[in-house]
Image (cartoon, rainbow, N blue to C red):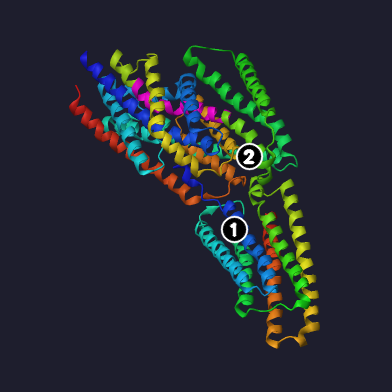
Amino acid sequence: MEAQYVYISLAAVFGLFMAWGIGANDVANAMATSVGSKALTIKQAIIVAAIFEFLGAVLAGGEVTATIRKGIVDAELISHEPRLLIYGMLAALLAAGTWLLVASRNGWPVSTTHSIVGAIVGFAAVGIGVDAVQWGAVGKIVMSWVISPLIAGFIAYLIYLSVQRLILRHEDPLAQAKRYVPMYMFFAAFTLTLVTILKGLKHVGLDLTLQDSYFMAVAIASGVAVVGALIIQRIKPNPKAEKSQHFYTVERVFGILMILTACGMAFAHGSNDVANAIGPLAAVIGIATTGNVAADSPLPIWVLVIGGGGIVIGLATYGKRVIATVGEKITQLTPSRGFAAELAAATTIVIASGTGIPISTTHVLVGAVLGVGLARGIEAIDLRVVARIMVSWVITIPAGAFLAIVFFYIFRAVLP
Amino acid sequence: MLANIFGSSPVKPLEKHIDISYRCARELRGFFAAAVKGNWSKARKVRAEIERLEHEADNLKKKIRLHLPKSLFMPVPREDLLELLLVQDKIANRTKDVSGLVVGRELQIPAEISEQFLDFVDRNVDAAKQARKSVRELNELFTAGFRGAEVVLVAGMIEKLDRIETDTDEKQAALRASLFAIEKSLDPIDAIFMYQVIELTGEIADMAERVGRRLELLLSH
């Protein structure tokens, strides 16, 4: 009986480590868009991230957690020896966390999702057996890694095109912005709440009918749009700043919108990426307490606190610096462009979360930025770096897998 | 990291470059005002400032080029931006050339045409100023994706630039005629160089007009 506490505490420590890594790297990248466009200060970005990452994880993170926990490894195959799965999940957490740390130190653009999925597949295929991996599910996940940035890019392209058509190319862009920005707010709030209600809330124990769900989403989105419109109306042009930059006040209107999409981005990220840290942790707890690999025990709340808390600590300790450097470099992403990228990315990620597919937030965001670029929204995109990002995600999978295999054999030899 | 996919944008630096080029050309007013009076110590001082600004423009030009690698993906062709940069730089170059020529020979501008000449210089500087005004819209053009109301605005600015350039052409022809009328009374070598100074000064407006042409090319993308 003593062993189970060892497993759970180890898993908690590794999970916290992983969550710290996510906060330091992934979240920082996601929030930097808003800081770079000056919609938020660094301090505000951290507060927004802390609240909405947590909300995203609790309200909409259930499906992805379930996928990481038991959608990749076929638990039935090892029901005779549940400990193997414990060692494996511990190894996967430590491997992904370590790889993330190494990558962040070297400034490599790696994805937390790719490292944890690579790690789980690695220990399962080598440590247990090739048949232990649910290849169908893994294939689906890998496909989504290719498709999700494309979808986000396409949505971002359409959004920014509409911004240009409706607002920026108009003779009076400020009046147009005040008219149309609340609509974008409605769209943002509607998609995010609808997916959350339809897919996420049942994990919290709420089950609404389809009609009620739509009604609620429309109600919340309308509320957000009305409040947003009221705030926007209060923005007055600043003639002095306007003289040197025609779109100065227009961008300030988009800045309000971007605060909303930044919340959406943090929420989306929480709904998808927190699972990378707490999915394996949940699996370890489930097996350790019941001794049964197929147990469907509910997620203890402290697990979520570890996930959310770890991210906030990571953000506050190391991510702050990442946000500052990243934010400085992306001044090209003014609010009118940044919001388009964020909204497209958040929408794509939340839909993936609702379907239980773990995708990479960073890559989706890159896809979205490229989409804005295709709509001629970005002054200069360095294609060499885009290529490097693609390469680094191919490397991340075997790297995560290799580390996980090493840790797996160590744990099997050392742990009770 | 995500941030690195943004290459360094050439837009602000291009706006800064035309600003330096214009400020360089603007110095010609003070330069020729001193030269006409035969105040060569003052002229040399202004000439030093012109050289400094031309040098500054040159350095910025090199820096912009270095930061525009082929791997950049931009809404407008990189070559067009580089061409724009090149003609912008020539405004400062011509300014330096003409002031160098005058100061080197301590070339005395004939009193009979001095007023007409200063007016001609003024108009050339106006052209450079209008070029600066047009290029300063680059940021807004990029934001609007080179379509819509902003394009109409810039097209109007370029039209005005063209009118100023036509104006300088007319002034240049009149100035040459005035010089021709008095050239027999001048030292022959001075007369030859005077024609050259008029030619070089007129090229400032020509370069400003070419800045407009380059911008126009961007508008049609």
- For disc 1, the marked residue is B17
Q: Helix, strand or loop at disc 1?
A: helix
**Mark closer to the observer (1, 2):** 1
Q: Helix, strand or loop at disc 2?
A: helix
**Image location (x, y in percent) of residue A28:** 45, 34
In three-dimensional space, the C-alpha distance between marks 1 and 2, rounded to whole angstroms, equals 30 Å
- For disc 2, the marked residue is A160
The amino acid sitting under disc 1 is: His
**Image location (x, y in percent) of residue B54:** 57, 65
Say left or right for B157 vs B53. Answer: right
Q: Is residue A135 visible?
A: no
Do dots 1 and 2 share one subunit?
Answer: no
Look at the image and tell me in which quarter the N terminus of chain B lies. Answer: top left
Q: Dominant secondary structure of the magenta stretch? A: helix
Q: Residue at x 49, y 40 (%)?
A: A327
Q: Toward which corner of the image does residue A23 lie, by quadrant?
A: top left
Q: Is residue A117 visible?
A: yes
The amino acid sitting under disc 2 is: Tyr
Q: Residue at x 43, y 34 (%)?
A: A320
Q: Residues within 10 Å of mark 2 (few under 14, many from 20)?
A: many
